[in-house]
Image (tube, rainbow, N blue to C red):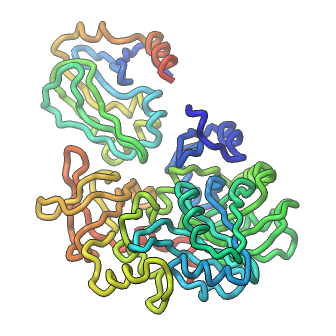
Amino acid sequence: MYPKDLKYDREHEWVRVEGDLAVIGISHFAQDQLGEVVYVDLPSAGDDVSAGDAFGEVESVKSVSELFTPVSGEIVDVNTALDDAPETVNQDPYGDGWMIKVRMSDAAEVDGLMSAEEYEAFIAEEA
Amino acid sequence: MSLELRETPLRAEHEALGGRMVDFAGWLMPVQYAGIIEEHNAVRSGVGIFDVCHMAEFRFFGFEAKAALDRIVANDLDRIDTVGDALYTVMCDEDGGIIDDLIVYHTGDLEYLIVANASNHDTDWDWICSHLPDEVEASDESERTALIAVQGPHALRVVAELAADGWEPPARFSIGEAMLDGVATLVARTGYTGEDGVEIFCHTSKAVQIWRTLLSFPEVVPCGLGARDTLRLEMGYPLYGSDMDRGVDPISAGLGWTIPRAKTGYIGESAIARVREAGPARKLVGLTVEGGIPRHGYAVLHDGAEVGKVASGTFSPTLSQGIATAYVPATLAEPGAVLNVEIRRKTVAATVTKPPFVKDTSLSAVRS
C-alpha cells in the first residue's frame, strides 16, 4: 500500500526520485478517500513551482482536492493520459497514476518528507 | 460522530457492508459502499437497493380526508380516484412557496398515505395537521415504517422472487399489499432513479430481514445517497433544499405540470395563478457542462455577467460529464442556449438542456 522506495508528504502526495527528477502522485489512502476520480486538473509542462504550491486538482463525484507539490523546481512532464482515463489514479496510484515530474531545484527537500513507515503512522492518526 | 443523529434499522447492515456513513437531515446514512459510480451503474444496468427508512410516512383517514388533503396539496386528488393509485405533488404556503414535494398514495377508500422528505418531516407534519379538520384522523407512522427502494431493469424480477407464486407487481405509480419473504408489506411502483422498480414499506422490525434477503441475490448491489443523487439528477428529478425551497413557487421551479390549471381551492392558488399569468421571471433549467463538475453555488454566467447560481450539480456517470440545474432569467431558459459556469478558477461552457439528461431507461420503456 505504501511502497518503501517512495517518500510522502502530509497532503498525501508521494515522490519517487529518478536522478534529478521527482515523480509525483497521490497515495493509496488519498485515492481511497476521494472515491472514483473523474477529473484530474494538471498544469502545463514548463511551470515553475515551490514546495507546498498547489499544482492542480483532483475531483471525484462528491469532492474536490487540491494537489500540492512536495518539492520545488520546473515541471518537465505532465501525465496527460489522465485526461481520458482519470480512474487510473484509483487503479494504479503509484505507477500509471503518476501526475507530474519536477526537475528539482533542491534535491535536499526530499529528505524532509516522510518515509513509508512514518506516513503509515501519520494516516493511522488521521483516520 | 454526533450522538444526536438518528439511525435507521439498517445502520449496522451498512457498516458491515463497508458503507461510508454521513449525516443527512439528522440521520446517519450511507453515502456509498463500493463507490458512487459503480453503484449508479448497477442501478442503470441491473438492480440496486437503497435504505430510505429516514423518509416520513403520514397516514390520513376519514370521510373528509380527500377534501382536506386536496386543499393542502396543489395537484388534484381526483387523479388518484382509484384505490392503489399514487400522485406526485407539491405542497405550498399562501405565498405559493414550496413547503415540500411529496407522493400521495390512495391506500384505501377513505385513506391516504403521504411520503415526504426526511428533511421536512416536522415542518410537513405540523403544516398538514394545522390545516386538517378534526374529522380526519392523522397518524405519523414514520417511526414504525421502514422503506427500502429496489431499482433497476432487473428490480421487478428480484422482488418477484420474494413474493408468492403468481404475484403481479403493481402498475407504474400504484401501490398494493404483498407478502414478501413472509413479511406483510406495501409495494409501490415508484422511485427516484428513472429506472423501473419499487419501494417496499414494512414494519421497522422486518427491515433487516427484507434487506438481507434482497442482498442474498448476487446481482443486487447496495447503493448509497451519493448514487441516489447522481441517478435522480440525470433524470432531472428535483431535490428539495437544492432545487427548490420555501422561497420559490412551483411554476418557476418547473413543476407547473403537477398543478392542473383547473385545480382550485388549495393553499397558494392565487399566488401561483399570478405567476402563471405573468410568466415566471426566472426558471429552473438543466445544464450540460463541459470540462468540469458544476457544484451547488457555482456562478452561472451569460456574456460575462453572473445570471444565476448552480442549484444541483454533479458528474453524470452515464454521460461522463457534468450536469446541473440553475435558476436563470426566463429569456435565457431556452434549450440550446449557451451559458457558462465558473468552476473555481476556470470558466466552462454550459448548454441549457431540457431534462431528462439520460433517456432510454428501463422506466421509459415501461411508460411507452
- Image quadrant where one finds the C terminus of chain B: bottom right
Q: Is residue A14 left or right of residue B157?
A: left
Q: Depth check: B110 or B240 in front?
A: B110
Which quadrant of the figure has residue B196? bottom right
With respect to residue B343, does B108 lie above or below? Answer: below
Residue at point 45%, 65% (across, down): B238
Residue at point 16%, 64% (across, down): B302
Q: Position of residue A67 (x, y in %)?
A: 30, 31
Q: Depth check: B326 or B170 in front?
A: B326
Q: Is residue A24 left or right of residue B187?
A: left
Which quadrant of the figure has residue B333? bottom left
Q: Depth check: B126 or B193 in front?
A: B126
- Image quadrant where one finds the N terminus of chain B: top right
Q: Position of residue A52 (x, y in %)?
A: 24, 21
Which quadrant of the figure has residue A22? top left
With respect to residue B171, does B229 lie above or below? Answer: above
Q: How many marks?
A: 0
Residue at point 58%, 57% (across, down): B121
Q: Depth check: B72 or A41 in front?
A: B72
Which residue is at the far front? B134
Q: Position of residue A87 (x, y in %)?
A: 42, 42
Q: Is residue A53 left or right of residue B35?
A: left
Residue at point 35%, 56% (across, down): B322
On the question of residue B50 being in view, the answer is no
Q: Is residue B97 left or right of residue B163?
A: left
Q: Position of residue A61 (x, y in %)?
A: 42, 47
With respect to residue B74, does B226 lie above or below? Answer: above
On the question of residue B115 being in view, the answer is yes
